[in-house]
Image (cartoon, rainbow, N blue to C red):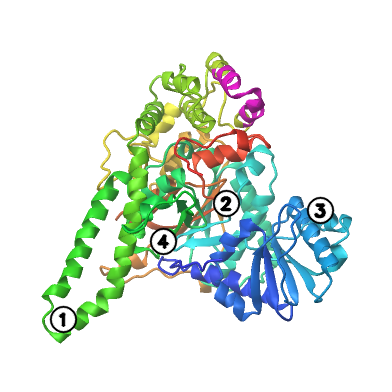
Amino acid sequence: MAGSGNHLGNGKLNLGSLRDYYRRELLECLDKCNGTKALVWDDALTGPFGLIVEYSLLKEHDVEKMMSLPKDNQALAPSSVQNIIFVTRPKLDLMDQIAQSLLKEDTKGGFRKEYHIIFVPRKSLLCERRLKEAGVHGSVTHIEEFSLSMIPFDSDLMSMEMDNSFRECFLENDMTSMFHAAQSLITIQSLYGIIPNIDGKGECAKHVVDMMMRLRRELEGQEPQITPQIDNLFIIDRTVDLLTPLLTQLTYEGLIDEMYGINNTSAKFPPQKFLSKNESSTSDMEYKTVVLNSGDELFSELRDKNFSAVGQVVSRKAKFITAEFDERNSAKTVGELKHFVSKLPHLQQARTELAKHTSIAELIKEATDTEEFMECLHCQQDLYKGEDTDKVCPYLEDCIGRREPLLKILRLLCIQSFCNNGLKPKVLDYYKREILQTYGFQHLVTLGNLEKVGLLRPHGIRNYITLRKTLKLTVDTVNEMNPNDISYVYSGYAPLSVRLIKFLARPGWRSITEVLNMLPGPTFNEVQQIPVALRKRRSSVTSSHSSIADQKVTLVFFLGGVTFAEIAALRFLAQQDDGGSDYIIATTKIITGSSLLHDISAKGLKGHITDGPYVHN
């Protein structure tokens, strides 16, 4: 498990407090087991835990070994520790793996150990019953739960990393993840104070806020008395804006996620571009893992830029670093040499970052320069501008004829459905028939799932044209190098979700009542009373710094997922002179269009749905 490396204290709100809270809770949980320990990890949890606690700290608490939960009936690796602690999600298939491991340990004999289970984020009666049925429940000394519900990814970003939350909530009507979302808001309020103003849009958003209010009432005044550090909470269902995640993101970080996938702030790339001049490529080389967070200065500068502007920044940075290194040749005095030497570690780090991002940018450029990428992008742009959305799309028809990846087909089909207020029955039936005949009838369930969640639907009354015009969703002229509008993140399309947030901040939602009524789910506002003694006192000093001191903090919570392009758009809003707010972003999961469609594809058919045109496994 790698250390997080995140700089979590750089934003207006210090998310480091949240990481410290989880770290303390975890260490207290581990310390209940006396003696040496080995941690056996559910693989899905190593990334999130790596962001809150470093292995060096675990070693201080008698953790001597870490291993993955064995699969395929394999035994645990041998160890001489006193305690084996399984850290796992409450899933039945994982209980079967744990049971197999415990049964194999039983046959080994030898050094006596105690076995413990930590469930994340909470215990499950079904899981405990499964362990009893397997005959191993009595072998477990302690069963604990660790409520890691919101993982700080960066100075302004946190995620619950619940892979199936969209499917569970909007397809299966299972609100378990929404309960965890409500709990995470209670934890946030215990650390940063009660959030006075809450605005929201969507059925799940209302459900989460209602649960949060109920959980607060159960606390009966036991909450910490803290001056609120967050002024507003805006909570929104993903189903309010299904168009945005389906479009191809065009920011640097968004494209990395589209093409290679970013998991727990890390991405894996083909190694060939990262070799030095003296190294040669071999077929068995491992993928290059790169950590992507604000601890990397160059990435911090590049991440939210439209990819068209990345080359310019990288080139400027290269010239600057070269000029800085050339200073050593002009240094004549001891003082000048000392000054250069003091800068050397930072310069060497900057040069390493530059080489890394030059390689990544080259990989992305190779993909974005292809005819395939540009044709798909132009098709998306024509659709969101409302051009010929009521007929069968010739490009989409050609893609099906060429048997291009099904995820690409489904993304384009759902975009057309949204931008045409649903598809005419004749057009929808034609697409369904073509897809089933070309890709197989097993995908009938997936098409049904898309209809259930509203991604694919017959022609209806929701008026995309009104949404597009009132919210200015499409912009004809976009300055990608020096943007003046959030539409730069998609080169001409402004995320609907972020436009709603901008209107809420100024001039307020009363100005767009008609639009809000067109979007699914209730629109609501809640006010949480703050004791007078704890209320924020706004700066009354009029100085050049007063506007910064008075900047409000808004927590934006996306239920069902958020894209890196939307995150970039919110950061852009916060930097504007008239932005009025700093934004902290929370989500159930960071998504792309492909991961969203994967989530709601028919169970058991994941392997049949090939990745999209830009996704590399």
Q: Which three-letter amino acid code belongs to the residue tagged 3?
A: Leu
Answer with left or right where residue 105 lies relative to residue 580. right
Q: Where in the figure is residue 503, as x and y percent of width and height?
A: 41, 45
| Pointer 3 or 2: first along the chain | 3
Tags 3 and 2 touching, CB below 8 Å: no
- Mark 3 or 4: the one toward you: 3
Q: Which span of residues is magenta-colored? A: 431-449
Residue that carries the numbered disc 3 in the rendered image: 126
Picture quadrant where residue 166 is located: top right
Q: Which three-letter amino acid code belongs to the residue tagged 1?
A: Glu
Gap between marks 4 and 1 measured at Cα: 44 Å
Would you say residue 573 is visible in this rendering?
no
| Pointer 3 or 1: first along the chain | 3
| Pointer 2 or 1: first along the chain | 1
Of 148 and 14, which appears nearest the observer? 148
Image mark count:
4
Q: Residue at x 73, y 56 (%)?
A: 90
Question: Is 219 placed above or below 510 here?
Answer: below
Residue that carries the numbered disc 4 in the rendered image: 552
Q: Check the image and name the residue furthest to the bottom.
A: 334
Gap between marks 2 and 4 measured at Cα: 24 Å
Classed neighbour count for the residue bearing mark 2: other residues with Cα under 10 Å, few (<14), some (14–19), many (≥20)? many
Residue 588 circle label? 2
- Mark 2 or 4: the one toward you: 2
Q: Which three-letter amino acid code belongs to the residue tagged 4?
A: Lys
Answer with left or right where residue 542 lies relative to residue 150. left
Of 192 and 400, which appears nearest the observer? 400
Picture quadrant where residue 447 is located: top right
